[in-house]
Image (tube, rainbow, N blue to C red):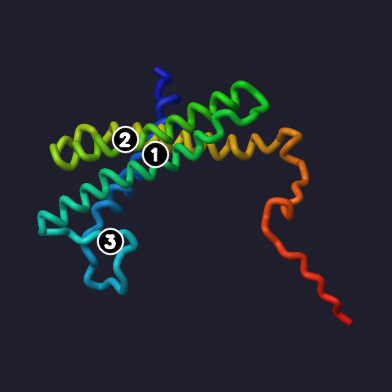
Amino acid sequence: MFRWFIYLPLRQFIYKPIRKLGKSFFDIIQTEVIPNNARHAPTFYAPHFNDQKAIITSLILASVFLPAFAIFFGGLHCIGWDFTYPTFTERTLWRVASLIITGTPVPIFFIYALILYKNWPVFEHLILVFLTVYLVARFFLVVLALVLLRKQPDRAFYAIDWSKFLPHHRWNLNLP
């Protein structure tokens, strides 16, 4: 009877913004027309290719390099796997969020390929689910990075004499 009280905020503040964000991402990807009255090309302008070789080359680049860079970006966050964390919960949240942003690009691009090439629009909602999980994990990493500044290990405050590690020349200027 009172379920609308729960579903309305979820739909209004979570589902609709994420769906709108997903639609804008698809619009960015599919920008291939310059309006007649435009003074410049759109930021994400990608012209439509009629040449089959150019299409295959761009698809290979998109399907190989984009997920590779996304996985590399997530892997950078996995460097903090063995860092010192104040609590077990924060360490676990960092690890889980790092794994999520490392692993979700592969299914996102695989599902996107199914939508484009097999013409299966059923999976559009699945991409939104993966994007939501990815964005939540990114949000957690940003928040955790700020929260973890509250309690740093003592070795974070050591003063390092960089002149011992960097090549330098001592200038002896005898100025009058």
Q: Quadrant of the C terminus?
A: bottom right
Which mark lies nearer to you, 3 or 1?
Answer: 1
Q: Residue furthest top?
A: 1
Image location (x, y in percent) of residue 135: 44, 38
**Tags 2 and 1 in contact by the CB under 8 Å rule?**
yes
Q: Is residue 171 left or right of residue 94?
A: right
Instruction: Give 140 or 38, whichever is nearer the viewer.
Output: 140
Alpha-carbon span between mark 2 and mark 1: 8 Å
Q: Is residue 48 left or right of residue 107?
A: left
Q: Amino acid at mark 1?
A: Ile
Alpha-carbon span between mark 3 and mark 1: 25 Å
> Which mark, residue 106?
2
Circle 1 is placed at which residue position?
A: 71
Instruction: Give 147 or 110, whichever is nearer the viewer.
Output: 110
Q: Residue furthest bottom?
A: 176
Image location (x, y in percent) of residue 19: 34, 40
Instruction: Give 156 or 2, whichever is nearer the viewer.
Output: 156
Q: Amino acid at mark 3?
A: Tyr
> Which mark, residue 45?
3
The 10 Å Cα crowd at callout 3, few under 14, some 14 to 19, many 20 or more, is some
Instruction: Give 14 or 122, whichever is nearer the viewer.
Output: 122
Q: Residue at x 27, y 51 (%)?
A: 29
The 10 Å Cα crowd at callout 2, few under 14, some 14 to 19, many 20 or more, is some
Residue 13 drawn above or below residue 170 = above
Q: Based on the displayed image, in which of its 4 quarters is residue 84 positioned?
A: top right
